[in-house]
Image (cartoon, rainbow, N blue to C red):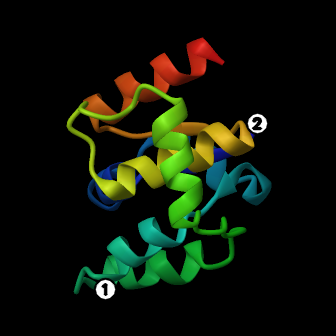
Amino acid sequence: MKILIDTSVWIDHLRQPVALVIDSLNNHSMIVMHPFIWQELFLSNSKKSEVLCRELSLFPFLNIASSSEIENFLLENPVRGKGLGLIDIHLLHSAWKEKYRLFSHDKKLMKVYKELVSKN
């Protein structure tokens, strides 16, 4: 199964290696990258994140959903009003649409993701 890894996990991985990330990095075909995550990481001004961004650019990148795709996703799924931001919604949409596993340290995001997966 392919894994979409959230910014929170990558940032933690820069501080202290995360086991799932290390395992996944050994198999490039398992990780997919969302452009918004890559861009968030690129905002950092550290050498570690610069190196990580170069490495992550080798993974397959997902397409960014259109506004209408996000609107339909929001209308069809109970994800509004849960305290999530737009990037979170894009990640949920990508993971849901492609049936990818989402990995985040954001508790709200993971709760909604698990609810979404269990209903589909």
Q: CA distance from mark 1 to mark 2?
A: 31 Å
Q: Nearer the viewer, residue 30 or 119?
A: 119
Q: Which of these two is toward me, 62 or 4? A: 62
**Residue sitting nearer the eye, 88 or 6:** 88
Question: Residue at image x 59%, y 63%?
Answer: 65
- What residue is shown with label 1? 47
Disc 1 secondary structure class: helix
The picture places residue 93, in percent across and down from the top left corner, at 55, 46
- Could you tell me which residue is drawn at 33 percent across and 56 percent down? 86
Residue type (three-letter) at the residue carrying disc 1: Lys
In x, y percent, where is residue 14?
A: 33, 62
Check disc 2 and report the residue beneath it.
Answer: 1
- Residue 2 vs 61, above or below: the answer is above
**Residue 9 horizontal side relative to residue 103, left or right:** left
The location of residue 116, given as percent across then percent down, is 52, 23
Kindly tell me whether residue 19 is visible in this rendering: no
Q: Is residue 17 left or right of residue 103?
A: left
Residue at the image point whose x is 46% and y is 29% from the top:
113
